[in-house]
Amino acid sequence: MTEPQKAMLDAVLTSGGLLVQILEAENAALEALNMPAAAEVLPTKTRVMESFSAAHQAAMRTGVKVEAADRSTLESLHERLTTLGQDNRRLLERAIGVQSNLIESIAKALPAGDPIAPVYGGRGKVASPAYRKPLTLSADA
């Protein structure tokens, strides 16, 4: 294997290892339903995924011949990324479902407009729903 090919393989392994760490962190946040922590990982995850993809494509274009020791490492990385990706998808779907249920519960709990007691605007006219005071929620406990 030439030095440039070795450098490309190292780039794949390095960015792949970083991607494993990021997916583990995101999955832990999603498992705990810590949406702010999961969202915080997204910009880094995007950059590392782009780096991993570019390194992989470059290695494929140059026809890097992988030696047995590196092949085993790459296969382990592939298996780990596959498992983490599947877990990530499942956890994201779960988190989206929980969030949807929460929003639906809040919306159902809101009082419906009372046609008998209209809300008046600043000029003494009945305010349209668009001008009524909005409901504000806070995630702080």
Image (cartoon, helix red, strand yellow):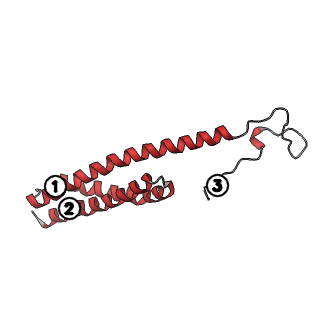
How many residues crowd around disc 3 within 10 Å: few (fewer than 14), some, or many (20 or more)? few
Position of 121 with respect to 11 (left or right) is: right
Quadrant position of the C terminus in the picture: bottom right
Position of 66 with respect to 109 (left or right) is: left
Q: Which residue is painted at 47% across and 46% down in the image?
A: 95
The percent position of residue 46, horizontal first and vertical second, equals 39, 56
Q: Which residue is painted at 77% across and 43% down in the image?
A: 131
Eye-nearest disc, 2 or 3: 3
* Residue 59 vs residue 89, the one in the foreground: 89
How many residues crowd around disc 1 within 10 Å: few (fewer than 14), some, or many (20 or more)? few
Q: For the image shown, how many numbered marks are present on the structure? A: 3
Distance from disc 1 to disc 3, alpha carbons, whole Å, reads: 53 Å
The percent position of residue 77, horizontal first and vertical second, equals 22, 56
Say the numbered circle drawn on residue 138: 3
Say the numbered circle drawn on residue 8: 2
Q: Quadrant of residue 112?
A: top right
Eye-nearest disc, 1 or 2: 2
Distance from disc 2 to disc 3, alpha carbons, whole Å, reads: 47 Å
Say if mark 1 contacts mark 2, CB within 8 Å: yes
How many residues crowd around disc 2 within 10 Å: few (fewer than 14), some, or many (20 or more)? many
Q: Is residue 18 above or below residue 109?
A: below
Quadrant position of the N terminus in the picture: bottom left
Say if mark 1 contacts mark 3, CB within 8 Å: no
Three-letter amino acid code of the residue under disc 3? Ser
Q: Earlier in the sequence, mark 2 or mark 3?
A: 2
Q: Quadrant of residue 89?
A: top left
Tell me the residue that label 1 is attached to.
62
Circle 2: element type: helix
Three-letter amino acid code of the residue under disc 1? Thr
